[in-house]
Image (cartoon, rainbow, N blue to C red):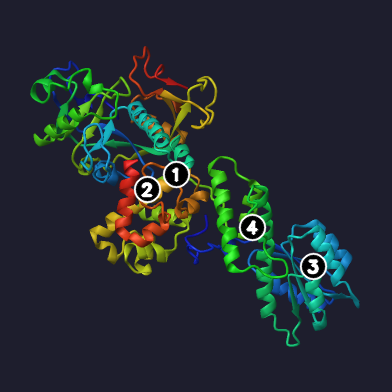
């Protein structure tokens, strides 16, 4: 069952001390190849990747997950969008560019045992104790990564901390979680939810009130702030709702979401155009 | 999908003969002979045989179905009709491969002159081995002609016509296969599939219809995913075993059971996991359409204009892994994850 209390961090943004309590749910959009519980929190993917993430340099073990499904979706959509632009810029063949428009993934919902020794990045103490550049504005810088955040990540690692909780640069609510160690053993084996989900980039002129139309990167302008998701198995989704395993619980089965931070008057109703 | 069953022919003409679906017209006026030939032809996998005993019936038959080859008796009910039949086929149905099967040795020259692709003389000992081989190749000739015709309509004007008066050699067939697969796959990837070409390739056994179920795939164990993806890309067990430097038996055990004594080595297990990621990338590149995965697995020089080419581009992914082994898997994955 999802509970906000399972994520212990200072909502007043003073202290950096944070932890994930026993029973906390983590959400992660895994590839279809590696969507088993055994693979979910190993951080092995980034170990063999020459690319950097927000808090990891190349080949540095890190698992990124969240405590909010929409944060997961927004983060992946943003990276799909960047990959599409990069493919065009790099003169990738047409099929490779087209392939960036759509991804099938698995939303893993993992219940974990306590992970203590986390650092909450969006806190005044982080600026004082770790790096003054990590502050309210910079922690949600919009680019995929910045050098000072890697240095901050290294500093957190060097102090033996387990990971970082931080606000998403793509979605206002809740937090992202970067884990620096293989935390597979912290996963509760008695809880197993995986939902099929499809993500798509959309055309700039997509009418939100109309069904999604296919987007051709060679003809259409890509929407620079929104993308589409769809849970493809409604039974699985309902089961997850019944188990109160989703945050937000009433996330629509499909719709368009922002991948930029934005205030919503009603949540999640105004966060998803469905 | 059929059960796990790698095709045997790997990189060459990846003919999955079991999937071929053809129609053969059989014309002979002698009931006993007709029955013998019908049984022989019906033994071809995926072949439907339609028969006639006279020219009129034969014409009606030809007009009713789409045939790939015709087996023609030169003399019907005491009248030599071979020339007329060949003329009719050449004029109205030039794609159908024409095999004259006659007891008249002296008519062999005429048959070839009037448009037979092959003329076989009936043997006194009733041995049909040669006939069997010729008809099997004739069917492939007929299908090749249809495929080339379709490719021409799609703009491949440089493609050489399959021969008339001879059967198709393997080299020519490979060229047709490569062109057809490339064209069909590229068009499908671009969202402008030619359904006629696909239908022909399906009939030829060069294309497999696959209904991909992402949900059950995602829930499979890793070794099952590799097994499925290997089947999708049309990689043989030998090729995969070569990449890993293990015996085909060891690799098969790994694919079937998820473990194998030879895979107790951590290096191989890690490489197996990386191979899954590489194949998964091909699945995503295909737009989750496994039907085009064999093309993406084998195609080379796809990234001519790309600023940072993948390491496999010169050889094609499958061959690159074949020649570079575990290091090749690693280098490929590094490139994929970096892009």
What secondary structure is marked by label 3? strand
Nearer the viewer's eye, disc 3 or disc 2? 2
Residue pointed to by mark 4: B203
Mark 2 residue element: loop
Of the two numbered discs 1 and 3 on the same chain, state the one appearing first in sequence.
3
Q: Quadrant of the N terminus of chain A?
A: top left
Q: Counting residues from the N terminus, which is met first, the one under dot 3 or under dot 2?
A: 3
C-alpha distance separating marks 1 and 2: 13 Å
Mark carried by residue B51: 3
> B293 or A211, which lies in front?
B293
* Residue B308 spot, x, y in % from top left: 36, 43
- Look at the picture and state if B339 lies above or below A224: below
From the viewer's perspective, tell me whether residue B138 is left or right of residue A106. Answer: right
Using the rendered view, name the quadrant where residue B52 is placed. Answer: bottom right
Residue visible at 79% across and 75% down in the picture? B34
The answer for which chain carries disc 4 is B
Circle 3 crowding by C-alpha within 10 Å: few under 14, some 14–19, many from 20: many
Single out the mark in the foreground, 3 or 4: 4
Residue to which mark 2 is pinned:
B310
Q: Identify residue for label 1.
A: B285
Residue B55 seen anywhere in this rendered image of the structure: yes
Query: In the rendered structure, which disc, 2 or 4, sits on the residue that comes first in sequence?
Result: 4
- Distance from Cα at disc 3 to Cα at disc 4: 20 Å
SS at mark 1? helix
Above or below for B237 versus A244: below
Precedes in sequence: disc 3 or disc 4: 3
Q: Chain of mark 2?
A: B
Q: Residue A175 location in percent, x, y?
A: 26, 25
């Amino acid at each position: 069952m999802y509970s906000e209390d399972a994520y212990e961090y200072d909502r007043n943004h003073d202290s950096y001390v944070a932890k994930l309590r026993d029973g906390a749910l983590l959400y992660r959009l895994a590839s279809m190849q590696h969507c088993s519980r055994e693979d979910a929190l190993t951080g092995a993917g980034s170990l063999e990747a020459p690319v950097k993430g927000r808090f990891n340099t190349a080949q540095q073990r890190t698992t990124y997950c969240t405590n909010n499904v929409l944060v997961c979706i927004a983060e992946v959509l943003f990276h799909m969008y960047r990959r599409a632009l990069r493919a065009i810029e790099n003169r990738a063949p047409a099929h490779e560019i087209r392939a960036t428009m759509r991804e099938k993934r698995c939303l893993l919902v993992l219940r974990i045992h306590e992970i203590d020794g986390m650092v909450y990045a969006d806190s005044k103490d982080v600026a004082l104790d770790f790096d003054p550049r990590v502050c309210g504005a910079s922690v949600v810088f919009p680019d995929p990564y910045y050098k000072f955040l890697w240095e901050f990540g290294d500093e957190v690692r060097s102090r033996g901390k387990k990971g970082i909780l931080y606000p998403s640069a793509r979605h206002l609510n809740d937090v992202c979680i970067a884990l620096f160690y293989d935390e597979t053993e912290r996963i509760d084996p008695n809880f197993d939810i995986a939902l099929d989900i499809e993500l798509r980039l959309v055309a700039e002129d997509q009418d939100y009130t109309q069904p999604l139309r296919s987007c051709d990167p060679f003809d259409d302008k890509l929407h620079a702030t929104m993308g589409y998701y769809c849970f493809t198995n409604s039974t699985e989704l309902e089961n997850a709702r019944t188990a109160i395993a989703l945050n937000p619980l009433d996330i629509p089965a499909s719709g368009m979401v922002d991948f930029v931070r934005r205030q919503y008057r009603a949540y999640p109703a105004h966060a998803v155009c469905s | 999908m059929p059960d796990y069953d790698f095709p045997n022919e790997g990189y060459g003409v990846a003919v999955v003969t079991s999937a071929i679906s053809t129609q053969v017209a059989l014309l002979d006026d002698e009931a006993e002979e007709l029955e013998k030939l019908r049984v022989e032809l019906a033994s071809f996998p995926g072949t439907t045989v339609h028969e006639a005993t006279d020219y009129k019936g034969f014409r009606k038959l030809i007009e009713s179905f789409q045939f790939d080859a015709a087996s023609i008796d030169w003399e019907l009910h005491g009248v030599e009709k071979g020339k007329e039949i060949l003329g009719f086929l050449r004029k109205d149905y030039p794609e159908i491969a024409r095999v004259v099967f006659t007891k008249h040795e002296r008519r062999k020259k005429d048959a070839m002159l009037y448009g037979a692709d092959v003329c076989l003389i009936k043997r006194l000992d009733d041995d049909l081995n040669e006939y069997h081989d010729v008809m099997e190749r004739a069917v492939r000739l007929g299908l090749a002609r249809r495929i080339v015709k379709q490719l021409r309509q799609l703009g491949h004007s440089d493609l050489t016509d399959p021969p008339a008066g001879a059967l198709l050699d393997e080299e020519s067939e490979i060229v047709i296969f490569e062109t057809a697969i490339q064209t069909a796959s590229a068009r499908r990837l671009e969202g402008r599939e030619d359904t006629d070409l696909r239908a022909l390739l399906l009939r030829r056994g060069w294309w497999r219809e696959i209904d991909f179920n992402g949900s059950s795939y995602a829930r499979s164990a890793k070794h099952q995913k590799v097994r499925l993806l290997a089947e999708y890309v049309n990689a043989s067990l030998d090729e995969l075993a070569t990449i890993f430097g293990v015996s085909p038996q060891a690799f098969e055990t790994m694919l079937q059971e998820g473990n194998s004594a030879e895979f107790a080595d951590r290096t191989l297990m890690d490489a197996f996991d990386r191979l899954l990621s590489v194949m998964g990338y091909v699945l995503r590149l295909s737009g989750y359409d496994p039907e085009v995965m064999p093309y993406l697995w084998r195609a080379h020089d796809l990234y001519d204009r790309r600023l940072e080419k993948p390491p496999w581009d010169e050889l094609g992914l499958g061959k690159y892994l074949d020649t570079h082994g575990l290091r090749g898997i690693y280098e490929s994955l590094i490139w994929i994850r970096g892009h």
